[in-house]
Image: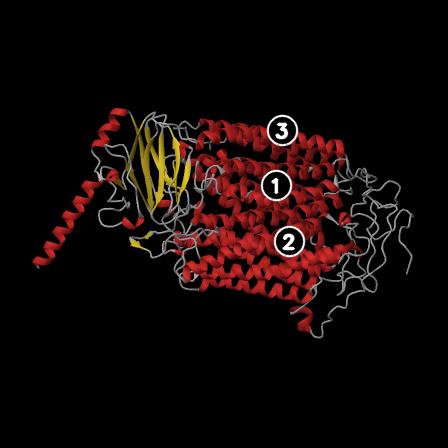
C-alpha cells in the first residue's frame, strides 16, 4: 500500500512542483517567444503522459497486488490495443515536432535587412566587431592576429579598416532591429549564450557560425559561455546592453576603428623601440 | 498467426553439433583468476566495474560539495572540479554501465539463458576481461601522474582537450584517457564477438530466436550496436592522439593559444563531434537496451504474468537499435554544423519515441491483471518505469531542435541524461542483482537492508534530478565550477543546489549499505534454493546452484516453449519452465 501511496504522491507532487516552483525561465528579451510556446506545448503533452503512466502503475499495484489465491491473467498479445496505442503516440509526437520544425525554420532563416555583428571568443574573454561607415565587415584571418589586431581582422581588406572593435568591453545593440550574430573563436570552442535571448550557438575555431534575433526590450544582460572552454569557463562573462536608437548612436561614436587601433599600436611600438635604443 | 506461446506442433530438431569440449581448469589460478568460465569472468567484470564505479561515486560527492557549497572546500578548485566531472562521466558511461551490462550480465546470463555450456570462445573471453582491467588501471593512473587526469569534460571536445587551458591537456591526463579508451574497445570487441556468436550459434535445441528471453534480446542487440559504434570512438581517439603527439591536424584548425600561433591548421573540431556522437548516441542505447530487456523479465517474473506483446517488444528493440544510428547529431544542434541538419535529426529523434513508448506501454500492460509480488526486483522495476518515463519525456524537449536551443548546455541536459541513462538503468542493475544474486551465490540478499537501499535510492535520486531540470530552465549552464554572480539567478537557486547536494550524499551513502549487503549475504544470507522466484527461464533450471562449470551437468537442456509461460490456464503451477514439455503434451522428438 505504501508503494501505491508514494507513486501517487510522486506523480501529483511533480505537477505541484512544476506549477509552484520559483525556478522558471528569465523574462524574455527577444523575438523567440515562439520557442517558449513550443516548450509550453511540450510540457503539457509530456506532463499528461507522465502522470497518466505513473497513476496507471499505481492503480495496477493497488488492484493487482499479490493476495493468496490470486492468479494472473494470460494474455500474450492484443494487436488492436497495440496499434491503437502506437497511433496515439505518433499523433502526440507529431503535435510537438510540427511546431518545433516550423519555429526552427524561422530560427535558421535570417530576414533581409539584418545588421551583422561579430562576436569573437578567446580564453576567456568576449570581443566584438561592428561594421563601420561602409556597413560591411571586413574578412578575418587567424594568422593575422598580432599586435594591435587581437581579432585577426584582415589588414589588406579595405572593408575592414573602418570596422569598430571592442576588446573585452560591453556590446550595445539597438532595440527592435533584427541582428545577425556572426560567431568566431580564435582558440577553442565557446558558446555565446544570453539566457534572456533564448538563442545560443557554439563558436568554433576555423569557421563562422551564426544566429539571429531581434531585441525586444532595453536592459543590461549577462553573456555566459555555454561550451566548456577550459579552466576559466565559468568566469568568461560579458555584457550586452540593449539601447534606444539615440543612446545606441551615442555609444557607437565612442568606439575605435580598426585603423585607429593599428595606428595606436604602431605608435606604441615606436615609443618602445625609441626608449630601448636610447638606453 | 504464429502461436508464440508453446510452439505447438513444432518439433525439436536433433542435436547436429556434438557437445562442446570445455577447457577444464587445472589449478586454482586457472579456475578463479585466469578463468575461461563465463560465470567467473562475469563476476570479475562486475566487481571491477563496481569498484571503479565507487570511484565515480566519490567524485560525484566531491563535485556536489562544490556545487552545493561553493567556496567551503578549498581543495576543489576549478582544475579539480573539471577533472572530477570528466572522470565521473567517463567512468559511469563506459567503465561501469557498458562493462557491467555487457561484460557482467552478458557473460553470466547469455550462456545460461540460451542453454549453452559457456561462451563459444572462452579464451578470447578471458582476454577481454584482462584487457578491460588494464584499461581501468590506465584510466586510474591519471590520478597519480603530474598534472592529474584530463579535465576536458567526458566528451573530450578538441581543441581544448589537448591545449594548456585544460587540466591534463598538455600533460599525461588526456594521453592516458585516450589510451584507456583504445584498450577498452579492444577488450570489449573480444567479449562482444563472443556474446553475438554465442547467441547465434550456442543456443540449446528448441531455443528459437523468438523464444529467447528479452534480457538476451537486449544484450544481444546492444552488443551488435557496440561492435558497430565503438570503432568510431576508436578512430577519434587515435586521431586525437596523433594531433596531440605528432602534430597532425585532424581536429585542429589554425588557432592562437594564449597569444601564440600554433603550427597546426586545416582540421575540423566538428569532425570529432560527429565521430564522438556517432558512437555516443548508440552508446545510450547500448546501456538502455540491456536494461529494457532485463526489466521486462523482472516485471514478467514478479507479476507472474507473461510479458505483454513479446514480438512487438523484440521488434521495438531492433528498431530502436537501427534508428539510434541516425540520430547522433541531436547532440550537436548548437555545435555550428549546418543548421539544415536540424530538420532531419529532430525528425528521426522524435520517431524513436514511438517504439520506446510501445515498450513502456507493454511493461505497464504486463502489470495489468497480473499477480504483482512487491519483491525487491519488482520495486526496482517499478522505479525504473517512473524514472525512465520521466527521463524519456524530457528527451522530447531536447530532441526537438528548436526547444533544445535554450536548454542545451544547461542543467536541464544534466538532469535529463542522468535520469534516463544514469538513474533508470542503474535501478535495473540493482533489481537485476537482487534477482540473480541467489543464482550466483545460492543465497538471498537481506530484505531489510534491500528495502532501505531501494527507498533511499529511488526517492533520493528523483529528488536530485527532478528539480535540477528547473535550474536548467532558469538558464544555469552546466559545467560551471562556480556560478559566481549571475544577475538572472535568484538566491533560491543556491538553496536548491544545496538541497540537491545533501540528497546526493545521502543516496551515495545508501550504496555503501548495498555493498555491505552484497558481501554480508554471501555468508549470512538466507538459503535460496535453485529457483527462489519460481521463474521459467533456463538459468533457474540448472542442476546445481551456483551452476558448475559447463552449467548443465551431463545433458544440455531442450527448450519447448517461450520464456513467459506464467499463470497458463490449466497448468498446476503458475509457471512452466522453458525446458518442460508441459501440460502433458510432449513435443520432444524422441529420435535419439
Can you tell which quarter of the image residue B27 is in?
Answer: bottom right
Residue B456 makes an appearance in the image: no
The residue tagged 3 is A91
Are tags 3 and 1 found on a single chain?
no
Instruction: Give the quadrant of the C terminus of chain A.
Output: bottom left
Instruction: Give the quadrant of the N terminus of chain A.
Output: top right
Identified at 30% across, 46% down, the residue is A141
Residue B262, image x and y in percent? 33, 56
All told, the count of numbered labels is 3
Label 3 resides on the chain identified as A
Identified at 45% across, 61% down, the residue is B175
> In 3D space, how far apart are the residues under numbered discs 1 and 2 (Cα atoms)?
21 Å
> In 3D space, how far apart are the residues under numbered discs 3 and 1 (Cα atoms)?
21 Å
The residue tagged 2 is B223
**Do labels 3 and 1 touch, CB within 8 Å?**
no
Q: Residues within 10 Å of mark 2 (few under 14, many from 20)?
A: many
Label 1 resides on the chain identified as B
The residue tagged 1 is B388
Residue B250, image x and y in percent? 43, 55
Left or right of B540 on screen, residue A57: left
Left or right of B401 on screen, residue B107: right
Are tags 1 and 2 found on a single chain?
yes
- Mark nearest the camera among 3 and 1 is 3
Query: Is residue B25 shown above or below B456?
Result: below
Can you tell which quarter of the image residue B307 is in?
Answer: top right
Q: Nearer the viewer, residue B527 or B307?
A: B307
Query: Is residue A278 shown above or below A220?
Result: below
Q: Residues within 10 Å of mark 3 (few under 14, many from 20)?
A: few
**Do labels 2 and 3 touch, CB within 8 Å?**
no
Identified at 28% across, 45% down, the residue is A151
Query: Is residue A74 shown above or below B37?
Result: above
Amino acid at each position: 500500500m505504501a508503494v501505491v501511496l508514494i507513486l501517487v504522491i510522486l506523480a501529483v507532487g511533480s505537477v505541484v512542483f512544476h506549477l509552484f516552483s520559483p525556478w522558471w525561465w528569465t523574462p524574455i528579451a527577444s523575438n523567440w517567444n515562439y520557442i517558449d510556446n513550443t516548450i509550453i506545448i511540450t510540457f503539457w503533452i509530456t506532463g499528461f503522459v507522465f502522470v497518466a503512466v505513473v497513476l496507471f502503475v499505481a492503480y495496477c499495484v493497488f488492484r493487482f497486488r499479490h493476495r493468496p489465491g490470486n492468479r494472473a491473467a494470460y494474455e500474450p498479445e492484443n494487436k488492436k490495443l497495440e496499434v491503437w496505442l502506437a497511433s496515439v503516440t505518433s499523433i502526440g509526437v507529431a503535435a510537438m515536432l510540427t511546431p518545433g520544425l516550423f519555429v526552427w525554420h524561422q530560427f535558421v532563416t535570417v530576414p533581409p535587412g539584418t545588421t551583422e555583428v561579430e562576436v569573437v571568443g578567446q580564453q576567456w574573454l568576449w570581443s566584438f566587431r561592428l561594421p563601420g561607415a561602409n556597413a560591411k565587415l571586413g574578412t578575418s584571418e587567424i594568422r593575422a592576429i598580432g599586435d594591435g589586431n587581437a581579432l585577426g581582422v584582415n589588414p589588406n581588406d579595405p572593408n575592414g579598416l573602418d570596422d569598430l572593435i571592442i576588446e573585452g568591453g560591453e556590446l550595445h545593440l539597438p532595440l527592435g532591429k533584427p541582428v545577425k550574430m556572426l560567431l568566431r573563436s580564435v582558440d577553442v570552442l565557446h558558446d555565446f549564450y544570453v539566457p534572456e535571448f533564448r538563442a545560443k550557438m557554439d563558436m568554433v575555431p576555423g569557421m563562422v557560425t551564426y544566429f539571429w534575433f531581434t531585441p525586444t526590450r532595453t536592459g543590461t544582460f549577462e553573456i555566459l559561455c555555454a561550451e566548456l572552454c577550459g579552466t576559466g569557463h565559468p568566469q568568461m562573462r560579458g555584457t550586452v546592453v540593449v539601447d534606444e536608437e539615440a543612446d545606441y548612436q551615442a555609444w557607437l561614436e565612442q568606439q575605435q576603428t580598426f585603423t585607429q587601433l593599428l595606428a595606436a599600436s604602431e605608435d606604441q611600438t615606436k615609443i618602445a623601440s625609441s626608449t630601448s635604443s636610447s638606453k | 498467426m504464429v502461436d508464440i506461446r508453446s510452439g505447438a506442433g513444432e518439433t525439436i530438431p536433433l542435436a547436429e553439433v556434438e557437445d562442446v569440449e570445455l577447457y577444464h581448469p587445472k589449478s586454482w589460478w586457472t579456475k578463479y583468476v585466469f578463468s575461461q568460465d563465463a560465470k567467473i569472468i562475469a563476476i570479475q567484470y562486475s566487481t571491477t566495474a563496481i569498484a571503479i564505479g565507487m570511484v565515480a561515486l566519490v567524485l560525484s560527492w566531491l563535485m556536489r560539495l562544490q556545487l552545493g557549497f561553493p567556496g567551503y572546500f578549498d581543495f576543489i578548485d576549478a582544475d579539480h572540479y573539471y577533472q572530477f566531472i570528466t572522470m565521473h562521466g567517463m567512468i559511469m558511461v563506459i567503465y561501469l554501465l557498458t562493462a557491467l551490462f555487457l561484460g557482467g550480465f552478458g557473460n553470466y546470463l547469455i550462456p545460461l539463458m540460451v542453454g549453452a555450456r559457456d561462451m563459444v570462445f572462452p579464451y578470447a573471453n578471458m582476454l577481454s576481461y584482462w584487457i578491460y582491467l588494464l584499461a581501468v588501471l590506465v584510466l586510474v593512473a591519471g590520478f597519480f601522474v603530474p598534472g592529474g587526469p584530463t579535465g576536458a569534460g567526458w566528451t573530450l571536445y578538441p581543441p581544448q582537450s589537448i591545449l594548456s587551458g585544460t587540466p591534463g591537456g598538455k600533460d599525461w591526463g588526456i594521453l592516458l584517457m585516450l589510451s584507456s579508451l583504445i584498450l577498452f574497445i579492444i577488450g570489449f570487441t573480444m567479449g562482444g564477438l563472443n556474446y553475438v556468436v554465442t547467441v547465434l550459434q550456442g543456443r540449446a535445441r528448441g531455443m528459437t530466436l523468438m523464444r529467447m528471453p528479452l534480457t538476451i534480446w537486449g544484450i544481444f542487440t546492444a552488443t551488435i550496436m557496440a561492435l558497430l559504434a565503438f570503432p568510431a570512438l576508436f578512430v577519434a581517439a587515435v586521431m586525437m592522439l596523433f594531433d596531440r603527439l605528432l602534430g597532425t591536424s585532424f581536429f585542429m584548425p589554425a588557432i592562437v593559444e594564449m597569444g601564440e600561433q600554433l603550427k597546426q591548421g586545416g582540421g575540423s573540431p566538428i569532425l570529432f563531434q560527429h565521430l564522438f556522437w556517432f558512437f555516443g548516441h548508440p552508446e545510450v542505447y547500448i546501456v538502455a537496451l540491456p536494461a529494457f530487456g532485463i526489466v521486462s523479465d523482472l516485471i514478467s517474473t514478479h507479476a507472474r504474468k507473461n510479458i505483454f506483446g513479446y514480438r512487438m517488444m523484440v521488434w521495438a528493440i531492433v528498431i530502436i537499435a537501427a534508428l539510434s544510428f541516425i540520430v547522433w547529431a541531436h547532440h550537436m544542434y548548437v555545435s555550428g554544423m549546418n543548421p539544415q541538419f536540424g530538420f532531419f535529426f529532430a525528425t528521426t529523434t522524435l520517431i524513436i519515441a514511438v517504439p520506446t513508448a510501445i515498450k513502456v506501454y507493454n511493461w505497464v500492460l504486463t502489470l495489468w491483471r497480473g499477480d504483482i509480488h512487491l519483491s525487491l526486483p519488482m520495486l526496482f522495476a517499478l522505479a525504473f518505469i517512473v524514472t525512465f518515463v520521466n527521463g524519456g519525456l524530457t528527451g522530447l524537449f531536447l530532441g526537438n531542435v528548436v526547444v533544445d536551443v535554450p536548454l542545451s548546455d544547461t542543467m536541464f541536459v544534466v538532469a535529463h541524461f542522468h535520469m534516463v541513462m544514469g538513474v533508470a538503468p542503474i535501478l535495473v542493475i540493482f533489481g537485476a542483482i537482487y534477482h540473480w544474486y541467489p543464482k550466483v551465490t545460492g543465497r538471498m540478499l537481506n530484505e531489510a537492508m534491500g528495502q532501505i537501499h531501494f527507498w533511499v535510492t529511488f526517492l533520493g535520486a528523483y529528488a536530485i534530478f527532478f528539480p535540477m531540470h528547473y535550474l536548467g530552465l532558469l538558464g544555469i549552464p552546466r559545467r560551471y565550477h562556480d556560478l559566481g554572480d549571475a544577475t538572472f539567478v535568484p538566491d533560491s537557486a543556491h538553496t536548491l543546489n544545496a538541497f540537491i547536494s545533501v540528497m546526493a550524499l545521502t543516496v551515495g551513502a545508501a550504496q555503501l549499505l548495498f555493498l555491505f549487503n552484497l558481501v554480508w549475504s554471501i555468508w549470512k544470507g538466507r538459503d535460496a534454493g535453485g529457483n527462489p522466484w519460481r521463474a521459467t527461464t533456463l538459468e533457474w533450471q540448472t542442476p546445481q546452484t551456483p551452476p558448475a562449470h559447463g552449467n548443465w551437468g551431463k545433458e544440455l537442456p531442450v527448450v519447448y516453449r517461450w520464456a513467459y509461460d506464467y499463470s497458463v490456464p490449466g497448468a498446476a503451477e503458475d509457471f512452466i519452465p522453458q525446458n518442460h514439455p508441459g501440460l502433458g503434451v510432449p513435443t520432444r522428438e524422441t529420435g535419439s
